[in-house]
Amino acid sequence: MNWQPSPCALIGLAMISAPIIAHAKIYVSIEQAQKILFPNKGLTKNPIVITDDLQDKMRAASSIRHPFQGERIWKTVDGGWFVVDEVVGKHEMITYAVGLSPTGSVIGIEILEYVESYGYEVAEPQWHKQFIGKTASDPIKLNQDIQNIGGATLSCKHLTDGVKRVLTLYDLTLKNTSQKNK
């Protein structure tokens, strides 16, 4: 007696071993996010050099290990800041932007690109609202002053830590740049 697999079993096996493909979703471009967060305000690109010491301090404050890139920073004419950053969701990078007032409080965040196949709820404006008004002196911790979204825990945690990193950058560097230009 020869065993022969059932055609249904072969289809089932193929479905189990098929990779899950994540599709990148671009929510808004950098230019669109700038217009959303800073309507009717001019922005000037203002890249900064991220020293090893600054990178270490930002890492300690936020637990984000992925290095911060200092070339995606813009300053508004009134001293606000627009910062683009990336964090890992669960497996893939999330690109987001943070708008900061001249005093360093969050005026809003925008998800630019999200690649994960789940956890996309972090792009919802309702979740972003809880960051508004936060400063570097706030805890900015998931399940403390920022609420989690079930099924998107790692994306929520990493974005929350990323916003903390951007606020730490403001507190350590950008704030001093704002004061020098007054």
Image: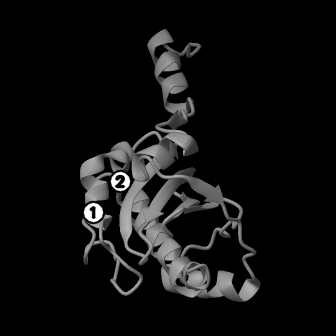
Residue 153 horizontal side relative to residue 68, left or right: left
Helix, strand or loop at mark 1 = loop
- The location of residue 169, given as percent across then percent down, is 56, 78
Which residue sits furthest front? Answer: 182
Residue that label 2 marks = 152
| Residue displayed at 55% across by 36% down | 24
Please say if 165 is above or below 172. Answer: above
| Tag 2–tag 1 contact (CB < 8 Å) | yes
Q: Nearer the viewer, residue 166 or 2?
A: 166
Helix, strand or loop at mark 2 = loop
Q: Quadrant of residue 74?
A: bottom right
Label placed on residue 148: 1
Please say if 92 is above or below 77. Answer: above
Q: CA distance from mark 2 to mark 1?
A: 8 Å
- Residue 131 visible in the displayed image: yes
Residue 166 horizontal side relative to residue 147, left or right: right
